[in-house]
Image (cartoon, rainbow, N blue to C red):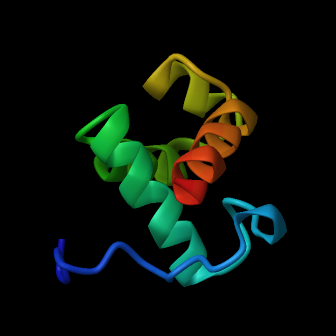
Amino acid sequence: LFEPESNGAVIRNPDRVHHDDSYRTTANFIDWVTRTHTKDLVQKIHIALHQGYKTEDWKTWTGKPVEELETEWKAALRK
Protein backbone atom coordinates (compact mmCIF):
# COMPACT_ATOMS: atom_id res chain seq x y z
CA LEU A 1 0.00 0.00 0.00
CA PHE A 2 2.66 2.52 1.01
CA GLU A 3 5.51 1.26 -1.17
CA PRO A 4 3.81 -0.41 -4.14
CA GLU A 5 7.10 -0.85 -5.99
CA SER A 6 8.46 -2.92 -3.10
CA ASN A 7 7.10 -6.37 -2.30
CA GLY A 8 8.95 -6.77 0.98
CA ALA A 9 12.30 -8.46 1.41
CA VAL A 10 14.34 -9.73 -1.49
CA ILE A 11 14.43 -13.46 -0.90
CA ARG A 12 17.77 -14.89 -1.97
CA ASN A 13 17.27 -18.48 -0.77
CA PRO A 14 13.63 -19.63 -0.76
CA ASP A 15 14.59 -22.91 0.91
CA ARG A 16 15.63 -21.09 4.09
CA VAL A 17 12.62 -18.81 4.64
CA HIS A 18 9.18 -19.22 6.14
CA HIS A 19 6.14 -17.03 5.66
CA ASP A 20 6.34 -15.80 9.27
CA ASP A 21 10.11 -15.22 9.62
CA SER A 22 10.27 -11.43 9.85
CA TYR A 23 8.43 -8.27 8.88
CA ARG A 24 9.97 -7.95 5.41
CA THR A 25 9.79 -11.67 4.61
CA THR A 26 6.18 -11.79 5.76
CA ALA A 27 5.49 -8.67 3.67
CA ASN A 28 6.84 -10.52 0.64
CA PHE A 29 4.57 -13.49 1.40
CA ILE A 30 1.49 -11.31 1.97
CA ASP A 31 2.22 -9.39 -1.24
CA TRP A 32 2.40 -12.66 -3.18
CA VAL A 33 -0.83 -14.04 -1.65
CA THR A 34 -2.58 -10.73 -2.36
CA ARG A 35 -1.47 -10.74 -6.00
CA THR A 36 -2.23 -14.43 -6.62
CA HIS A 37 -5.20 -15.34 -4.40
CA THR A 38 -7.18 -12.55 -2.74
CA LYS A 39 -6.96 -8.80 -3.29
CA ASP A 40 -8.38 -7.85 0.10
CA LEU A 41 -6.10 -10.06 2.20
CA VAL A 42 -4.71 -7.23 4.35
CA GLN A 43 -8.21 -6.16 5.35
CA LYS A 44 -9.10 -9.77 6.20
CA ILE A 45 -5.97 -10.15 8.34
CA HIS A 46 -6.69 -6.86 10.09
CA ILE A 47 -10.24 -7.91 11.00
CA ALA A 48 -9.08 -11.37 12.12
CA LEU A 49 -6.45 -9.87 14.41
CA HIS A 50 -9.17 -7.93 16.20
CA GLN A 51 -11.68 -10.78 16.30
CA GLY A 52 -9.34 -13.68 17.06
CA TYR A 53 -6.91 -14.79 14.37
CA LYS A 54 -6.62 -18.52 13.71
CA THR A 55 -4.20 -20.24 11.34
CA GLU A 56 -7.23 -21.88 9.73
CA ASP A 57 -8.36 -18.44 8.51
CA TRP A 58 -5.99 -18.76 5.55
CA LYS A 59 -8.09 -21.60 4.12
CA THR A 60 -11.23 -19.47 4.45
CA TRP A 61 -9.56 -16.48 2.79
CA THR A 62 -7.78 -18.30 -0.04
CA GLY A 63 -9.16 -21.82 -0.21
CA LYS A 64 -5.76 -23.20 0.86
CA PRO A 65 -4.01 -23.75 4.19
CA VAL A 66 -1.10 -21.44 4.93
CA GLU A 67 1.38 -24.32 4.60
CA GLU A 68 0.26 -24.95 1.01
CA LEU A 69 0.44 -21.24 0.24
CA GLU A 70 3.98 -21.13 1.62
CA THR A 71 5.00 -24.02 -0.62
CA GLU A 72 3.54 -22.25 -3.68
CA TRP A 73 5.18 -18.94 -2.68
CA LYS A 74 8.58 -20.60 -2.40
CA ALA A 75 8.11 -22.22 -5.81
CA ALA A 76 7.26 -18.81 -7.28
CA LEU A 77 10.37 -17.32 -5.66
CA ARG A 78 12.56 -19.96 -7.28
CA LYS A 79 11.38 -18.98 -10.79
Q: Nearer the viewer, residue 6 or 38?
A: 6
Q: Is residue 30 left or right of residue 66?
A: left
Residue 69 x, y percent position in the rendering:
61, 37
Q: Residue furthest right?
A: 16
Residue 53 in sight here: no
Q: Position of residue 67 (x, y in %)?
A: 75, 37
Please tell me whether residue 77 is drawn above or below residue 39 in the rendered image. Answer: below
Q: Is residue 62 above or below residue 43?
A: above
Q: Residue at x 55, y 58 (%)?
A: 77
Furthest residue to the front? 79
* Left or right for 8, reference 19: left
**75 above or below 31?**
above
**Residue at horizontal 50%, vertical 82%?**
10
Q: Quadrant of residue 3?
A: bottom left
Q: Is residue 12 visible?
A: yes
Q: Position of residue 40 (x, y in %)?
A: 25, 41
Check the image and report above or below for 41 versus 50.
above
Q: Please name the residue shown 33% across and 46% down the image.
A: 34
How many marks can you see?
A: 0
Between residues 53 and 14, which one lies in front from this camera angle?
14
Placement of the N terminus among the 4 image quadrants: bottom left
